[in-house]
Image (spheres, coloured by chain):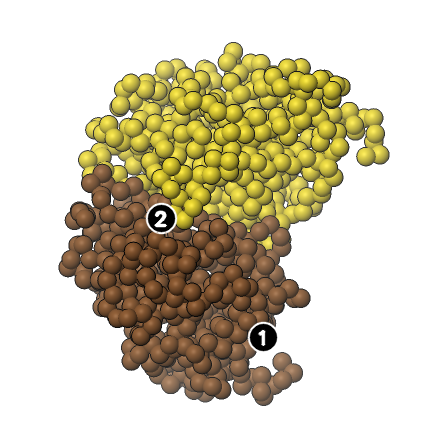
Chain colours: A yellow, B brown
Amino acid sequence: MSIRTSAILRHVALALLLLSSAQVSAQQAVINGADSDPNFLEWMTGFPPAEEKLISQPYSDFWSFPKIRWTVCHLRELLPTRGVSRGTGAPLALGEAVSQALSELLVPSTMGGDTAKAQLDHSAADWLPLKTFLINNYTDGFIVLHKGVVVYEYYGGCLDRERQHATMSMTKSVTGLLAEMMIAAGQLDDSLPVTHWVPELGDTSFAGATLRQVLNMTTGVAFDETYSNPESDLWVYASASDAMPKPASYEGPVGFLEFLLTLQNRDAPHGTRFKYGTINTDVLGWVISRATGQSLADVVSTKLWQPMGAELDAYFKNDARGIVHAGGGLNAGLRDLARLGQLLLDGGRVGSAQVIPAPAVTAIMNGATTAEPTGERYAQYWPGYRSMWWYGGDAARPLIAARGVYGQTLYLDPAAEVVMVRLSSHPVASNVAIDPGVQPVYRAIADILFEAESVAPEL
Amino acid sequence: MSIRTSAILRHVALALLLLSSAQVSAQQAVINGADSDPNFLEWMTGFPPAEEKLISQPYSDFWSFPKIRWTVCHLRELLPTRGVSRGTGAPLALGEAVSQALSELLVPSTMGGDTAKAQLDHSAADWLPLKTFLINNYTDGFIVLHKGVVVYEYYGGCLDRERQHATMSMTKSVTGLLAEMMIAAGQLDDSLPVTHWVPELGDTSFAGATLRQVLNMTTGVAFDETYSNPESDLWVYASASDAMPKPASYEGPVGFLEFLLTLQNRDAPHGTRFKYGTINTDVLGWVISRATGQSLADVVSTKLWQPMGAELDAYFKNDARGIVHAGGGLNAGLRDLARLGQLLLDGGRVGSAQVIPAPAVTAIMNGATTAEPTGERYAQYWPGYRSMWWYGGDAARPLIAARGVYGQTLYLDPAAEVVMVRLSSHPVASNVAIDPGVQPVYRAIADILFEAESVAPEL
């Protein structure tokens, strides 16, 4: 396999994108949230934009910080993409009741402090308004629903209500949810090997892995992330998934699926360990498409976006074969991701329609009890993983999350009847690094709403 | 300027796309409408599609017939694109009342016959149902509105109600309409030279041309379409507008706007002749963006798609600088193009809102009287052109049209209160060739509705 140096350089940032890996640290000088705001930096302004304001191919340009803060809302202008239709009807309306408590919430300027007490002291000089915290934390959109009603909503950076944002690995949770829906409907059986649907995987290291092992990321498939080896899986994956025309000399796999066929090594028996890896979700997407005969984009449209009353179409990045990226390619609107979370809190129902089968809701919402332990790296906040969702909290306040590598989050606190979505473009591509600065704030917000409910039930 | 042979080959079909030129004749063997249906041919089916079912880069592949019959509904999966938001509200509902007369209409199998009498004889063997005519004529979508009500609607080929179709040069009419709206609002003055907004054009053959001359395509700018010369304007334009990464050896202009700066020759004084040319619309788009400070995509969204109650987002092809293609890049839904036509018939009003200023409606709807003569080539059906719209019919039944190179049409017959939209992917990229087979059918349909109105006013 021959991959040219130029191709390697082009794909550095793509790899950063695809692997939410602790080894990945931003090489760029980091500037703060306000100073990296894409409007402040005037990216892509002018007709045409001046060279110093331009964001364009290759990947290594448009995924670099701070350009990424523009890119996360504009991927379709840089790459081929496939639409996820919301249909042609009226969107499902969301109630709105601005929470004074959240508008006035102060957050320690350290961001990682004991923010559970944030609402107690509004006068300390090192406490900042929630909005300032969001700006400082590279937030492009933040919405809080309490009992299905929008109580806080913020757009900044590149995002507005009419635009889709890259969700990165939050995509995995959408793909995982679809799989649970199909299991509940009898269209998939998680005890069967994935080769039942995709026999081609019989010649790869996925041979023998069950659908459940793929769903819970306990397959033993090895994925070589060696940066210094241009023929490591990391670089082959990056080149394969790029939808741009390949150089004439390119001899590697083309597309997400052909890449999966190159995986030949295991570093553990299947089912013996949790190891976070996008390749598992790519396999899951393949299984869903084979079982339904549909692109994953169309499955998301018909099973979720249309029946849940989305207000924006969503879209997926696709490869040169038209296959969408099941493991990280979804771009969606802030409110629609909140609708998805609320749908889970509402037992899968929109009005009288059961959009998500009840057993699938149960599988996601009660997944903590059977989740795989994620290990020391994630233990502080998200010790469990199942069906491509993250689990935290405790028995009294279980927490369920979808998470993307730049801090994107769908955060469900069912006991508090709270759904939060944060879309962001953090310079450090690692939730392990981002979590200490944001998780206490999410908890403080949910506590305020939970307590307000207890204290003032007439709200 | 050095353009490589490989780059030339890649862009052959792009050039076919961009220039609705009589010299352009399809090189491919032509198969009929039913046999070229992309569903019948199973393009892009399978996960992943087999090599013989694949449609992908380069342009010369995906624009070739019959692949084009898939491509016209899937451009965003092959190219970077920019969205035109419909907003987040409920779409404007269209009434529906299926016309029995149209459902039963028979059309001569020759397609170019005296179809005004088509409804008189349903038994002749060489008369075909309207639906069969549409299929035979490479139609992907066809809708007829009478008095604002949908009386006929057909989806075939690659299209359905939730998908956008390439409109090609229909885009020009949308851009021209926006210019008339801005003229009516005092934001543009059509007597000023285009260099008033784009001083850079002072060093090109557009120097001295007025906005009106650009709008009416009477500029004297030469555009060398010599296929055999790899450095002709045709090929430079094709390479410049491609948003894909350029080869390292590429030294030509990048993007639609930089290309315009390369035009240095005139073959007539400005204002002395009509000559259809996409470059005029590209200049117009530049003027609109400079005057508004917005991408043309956002202008279409805020001035038309949102206020007219579109049911689908639309989108534009964009270049490597993020500039959208004002002269041919719009992809839109069938019903939304019909809404745009109805908006013009309704005097620019949606309910009580004046979406299009009345003088701009007049400029488009009454343009025939001041239209430029289009010359012998177009004389039979469309003898006039003004503000990027085509004019035909006569004083009693004036006709106004937006037209795309593969037979796409927005057809307005105000006297009959009829709006028709046809989206299509004809193998012959020339409306001059397509017109004799379709214009009599459009007229017959409008006549049926016009007469039904006269005979049965209680309808």
Q: Are marks 2 and 1 on the same chain?
A: yes
* Chain letter of the residue beneath label 1 in the structure image: B
Q: Considering only order in the chain, which callout, 1 or 2, is on the residue closer to the N terminus? A: 1
Q: Quadrant of the C terminus of chain B?
A: bottom right
Please name whichever residue, B53 or B312, is drawn nearer the observer in this view of the structure: B312
Report crowding for label 1: few under 14, some 14 to 19, many 20 or more residues within 10 A (C-alpha): some
Please name whichever residue, B448 or B187, is drawn nearer the observer in this view of the structure: B187
Q: Position of residue B372 (x, y in %)?
A: 37, 76
Give the answer, above or below, for where A110 lies relative to A203. above
**Residue pointed to by mark 2:** B319
Q: Residue at x 52, y 61 (%)?
A: B187
Q: Position of residue B118 (x, y in %)?
A: 43, 84
* Chain letter of the residue beneath label 2 in the structure image: B
Please name whichever residue, B364 or A142, is drawn nearer the observer in this view of the structure: B364
Q: Position of residue B438 (x, y in %)?
A: 38, 75
Q: Which mark is residue B147?
A: 1
Report crowding for label 2: few under 14, some 14 to 19, many 20 or more residues within 10 A (C-alpha): many
Q: Position of residue B108 (x, y in %)?
A: 37, 81
Q: Residue at x 41, y 17 (%)?
A: A23
Whether residue A434 is visible to the viewer of this picture, yes or no, is yes
Quarter of the image where one finds residue B251: top left
Element assignment for label 1: loop
Amino acid type of the residue that numbered disc 1 sits on in the rendered structure? Lys
Badge 2 vs badge 1, beta-carbon distance below 8 Å: no
Please name whichever residue, B335 or B205, is drawn nearer the observer in this view of the structure: B205
